Amino acid sequence: AQSVTQLGSHVSVSEGALVLLRCNYSSSVPPYLFWYVQYPNQGLQLLLKYTSAATLVKGINGFEAEFKKSETSFHLTKPSAHMSDAAEYFCAVSEGDFNKFYFGSGTKLNVKP
Amino acid sequence: DTGVSQNPRHKITKRGQNVTFRCDPISEHNRLYWYRQTLGQGPEFLTYFQNEAQLEKSRLLSDRFSAERPKGSFSTLEIQRTEQGDSAMYLCASSLWVYAGLSSYEQYFGPGTRLTVT
């Protein structure tokens, strides 16, 4: 079975500071990994995805993530936080046939002015 | 491409009543998924369709829950005899799956239907 652990349910950074949101996964098969962002009362929007190509993945809004197989991690980073980045972020892993995603419990990002 | 749409956006119902939600996926997508998200948690998989066939159901989907996708386009999720524990956000997603690894992989989510059972 696959699972995702997101360390830190709440992360607070100052505007302009580095954003680091952690995601570790477990998978018995080569994983496909995703980061989604959710704003209040909205659905999930895809930020980026890893599908066995380059291990450093760039996404929208300046976010990127690095797949590290040895650490079973897929942490999300952004060099400089913006107020508009305040939202909840979910890491997800899918099975080989992409028939369902397993989501982490989410990390709420707060950006202080 | 208008994205995935869900109706209604909000539903308040009394315990014991039946409710039905609708999801319209992106038009060319052949896979449709239902997830449930409770407060402070990530979405949990409920079921998915490929075209009109329901291929998998989670253990979370009790006998009171039923989902259909009759013509391989829109889908409905019905909850019978609602309980307070059913209060959650119900999310629908769609994707394009193509055999032999040519899929785009990601799922596109709708805005969700927030159910409150009183």
Image (tube, rainbow, N blue to C red):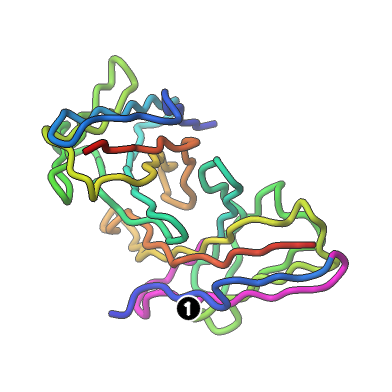
Tag 1 residue:
B24
Look at the image and tell me in which quarter the N terminus of chain B lies. bottom left
What percent of the width, then of the height, locates residue A100?
Answer: 49, 50
Asked if residue A37 lies left or right of residue B56, the reply is: left
Look at the image and tell me in which quarter the C terminus of chain B lies. bottom right
Residue density around tag 1, few if under 14, some if 14–19, many if 20 or more, within 10 Å: many
Asked if residue A108 lies left or right of residue B118, the reply is: left
- In the rendered image, residue B22 lying in the magenta stretch gets the answer yes
B71 shown above or below A36: below
- In the rendered image, residue B10 lying in the magenta stretch gets the answer no
Name the residue furthest bottom.
B71
Name the residue furthest front.
A113
Q: Amino acid at mark 1?
A: Asp
B68 shown above or below A26: below
Q: Residue at x 34, y 37 (%)?
A: A109
Q: Residue at x 66, y 72 (%)?
A: B11
Q: Residue at x 56, y 55 (%)?
A: B35
A91 shown above or below B73: above
Q: Residue at x 59, y 71 (%)?
A: B10
Asked if residue A51 lies left or right of residue B59, the reply is: left
A113 shown above or below B65: above
The subunit letter for the residue under badge 1 reads B
Asked if residue B63 lies left or right of residue A40, the reply is: right
Q: Which residues are magenta?
A: B15-33
What percent of the width, then of the height, locates residue A23?
Answer: 36, 28
> To which quarter of the image does residue B116 belong?
bottom right
